[in-house]
Image (cartoon, rainbow, N blue to C red):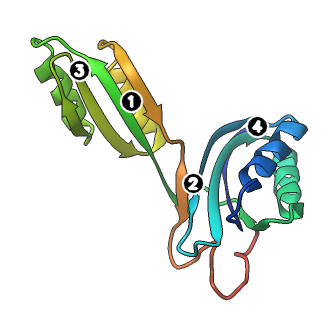
Amino acid sequence: MEEKVILSALANNHPGVLLRITGLFNRRGFNIESLTACTTEDPKTSRMTIAMTGDRSQIRQVMCQLMKLEDVKKVSLPTKEDASHSELLLVKIRVDNGQRSDALHIAYRHGARILDISHHTITIEATGQSGQIDELIQNLQKYPVVEMARTGITALERGDGSISDHDGTSRPGA
């Protein structure tokens, strides 16, 4: 049975690492639903959060294959209960003067921020879990979308544990 999972990976931060990781998914025929990558508190290390769908066997295979890559330091599979996750949405919608108030009300009701208001558009920024972002997009559907950018999921483990424990050990089950 396929399920959507979030993988967290730490890798050396230098050119080509992201290409090798995405190439591994491509060669195995696995789809990346979203991927975020950034430098960590240590500038020599990158953190990647990868959302994918697969069965347990496929997920285990991807994790093992990732760990075989020279530049990958750690890989973990936090459950939704074990992780805090969020994503960012920037959306610019077209509004007439008579619609502006309703569009702003929808944005504020979802806890979004208004980044820009022009004569014919409003640019909205929202952060939250994927379902919350989907709901905001759904509620804004009556307005034509001029542009939209969505980051994908970023996650950190809840509590005191961390994939980047500085003692050099990986979290249990990783």
Residue at image position (73%, 75%) is: 172
Mark number, residue 80? 2
What residue would you read off at disc 3?
A: 121
Image: 124 above or below 16: above
Picture coordinates of residue 129, whole percent (x, y): 44, 45
How many angstroms separate mark 2 from mark 3 (CA)? 36 Å
Q: Is residue 28 left or right of residue 149?
A: right
Bin the neighbour count of mark 2 within 10 Å (Cα to Cα): few under 14, some 14-19, many 20 and up. Answer: few
Quadrant housing residue 111 = top left
What residue would you read off at disc 4?
A: 2
Which residue type does callout 2 highlight?
Answer: Lys
User: Which circle, 4 or 3, is nearer the viewer?
Assistant: 3
Which residue type does callout 1 highlight?
Answer: Glu
Residue at image position (37%, 35%) is: 90
Picture coordinates of residue 5, whole percent (x, y): 67, 47
- N-terminal label among 2 and 4: 4
Q: Is residue 32 left or right of residue 30?
A: left
Which residue type does callout 3 highlight?
Answer: Thr
Residue at image position (73%, 82%) is: 169
Picture coordinates of residue 3, whole percent (x, y): 71, 40
Bin the neighbour count of mark 4 within 10 Å (Cα to Cα): few under 14, some 14-19, many 20 and up. Answer: few
What residue would you read off at disc 1?
A: 135
- N-terminal label among 4 and 3: 4
How many angstroms separate mark 1 from mark 3 (CA)? 20 Å
